[in-house]
Image: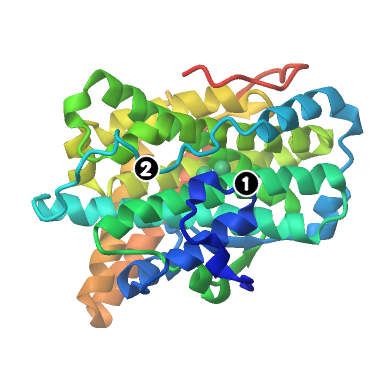
Amino acid sequence: MNIQNPEGYKGKHTADATTVEEGLAIQEEQAKYDDDFATETAMANTLLTPRFYTTDFDELDAIDVSGIREEWDALIAQMASDPNKGHFKKNDDWDHVDWDGMEPKLKKEFIDFLISSCTAEFSGCVLYKEMKRRGNNKDITQLFQLMARDEARHAGFINDALREAGLRVNLGFLTQAKKYTYFRPKFIYYATYLSEKIGYARYITIFRHLEANPELRFHPIFKWFEEWCNDEFSHGEAFALLMKTDPKLTSGGNVWWIKFFLTAVYATMYVRDHQRPAFHEALGVDPDWYAHEVYTKTSELSKQIFPITLDIEHPAWQRNLVRLQKANVQIAEGKQQGGVGGKLRELAGSAKAARAFVALFMIPSKKHKVPEVTRLEPVY
Ligand SMILES: [Fe+2]
Ligand SMILES: [Fe+2]
C-alpha cells in the first residue's frame, strides 16, 4: 500500500475519514507496533475464516444501471449523505473494559471474534477499493468508493477495540501478504450480497437482544451495532440492485448457485458460532436460537432478489447442521492429534462434513415471486 504523507493524518480518527484512502492512512499512522498474533490469525486461510477476494473488474465495470436508475440514485444519494460520519469512534458511551479481569475463555473467544470481524470488514474494504480504483464507470466507482469508505471505518473501529487489549491487525501487511481468492463477478455478487445481509441480521439480532438485556453487554462495542449494521444493510441493497441489472443472474441454472451460496453461508455461520460457546454464553445467546433467528431474517430479506429461500424449518436442516458441526470438531481434533491416527480422524471428519453439506444442499428449497421494487428498509 502506498500511503503518501501519513504524518498529515495525525490526530484524525478513521470515523471522520470521508474516503477509504484517508481511513486507511489513519490506520497506518496509528500503527505504533505490529501485533503478530492478531495479524497471523487474520492471515489464516481455512474454509471457515474470512478470505480476501479478487475478481474480473472489467466485467464489473461494464454494468449498466440505467434500467434501475431510480432505485440506484436513491440508494447512492442516501449513502453519499453519510449518516454515520464520525460515528465509529470511542466516546462517553464507551465503558471501561476490564480485559485483565475477563474470564480467559471468554477473552480468547471474544478476541477471536474481533479479529475475524476485522478481517471480514477489511476483506470488503480491499475488494471495494480495488474496484473503485480499476473502474471507469462512474456509477460503479462511486458505489464502491462509498462502500470501501464504510468498511475502512468499521475495520478501524474494531482495531480501536483490539488495541485496548494490546492487539492490532496490521491491515497494510494483510493487503500485501494475504492470499487472494479469485471469484467470477457473479459469485462475488451472491457471496457478498449474502455476507452483507447476514452481517446486518447478525448485528441487529445481537443489538436488539442486548437492548432488552443490557446487563449482558460485556463490551461497549455492541452499542455501535445498530448504525453499523445499517451500513451493511445499504451495501446489501447495492448488490441486490447490481444483480437486478441482469435477470439471468437470478434465474435458470444460476438458481442452483444461489442455493449453494445460501447453504454455504448459513452453514459456515453455524459452525463458526459453535466454536465460541463462552462468547455466546456471556451474551446470553443460545447459538442454535441465534442461527435460526439470523437465517429467518436473512431469508426474508433475500426474497428481494433471490427466487428461492432455504427451508430452514425442514427437519433435516437442523439435524445436518449439527452433523456438520460435529464433523468439524472431529477435523479439528484430528489436526491437533497429528500423526497417522490424527490424519485418518481428520479425513473421516471431512467425509462426514461433506455428506452433511450435501444433505443440507439437497433439502428442497422454497420458491417465490421476486417483487417488482427491490429496495427495502432496515426494519428489524
Ligand atoms: Fe462493514
Ligand atoms: Fe459491508
- State the residue in front, 26 or 110: 26
Q: How is the image coloured?
A: rainbow
104 is higher (above) or lower (below) than 40: above
Residue drawn at x 31%, y 42% is 322
Q: Is residue 45 shown to the viewer in this render? A: no
Percent across and percent down for residue 336 are 23, 72
The earlier-in-sequence mark between 1 and 2 is 1
Percent across and percent down for residue 185 are 74, 52
The amino acid at mark 2 is Tyr
Check disc 1: other Cα within 10 Å, few if <14, some if 14-19, many if 20+. Answer: some
Q: Determine which residue is flagged by label 2.
A: 270
The amino acid at mark 1 is Thr
Residue drawn at x 60%, y 28% is 302
SS type, badge 2: helix
Q: Which mark is residue 18?
A: 1
Percent across and percent down for residue 230 are 53, 30
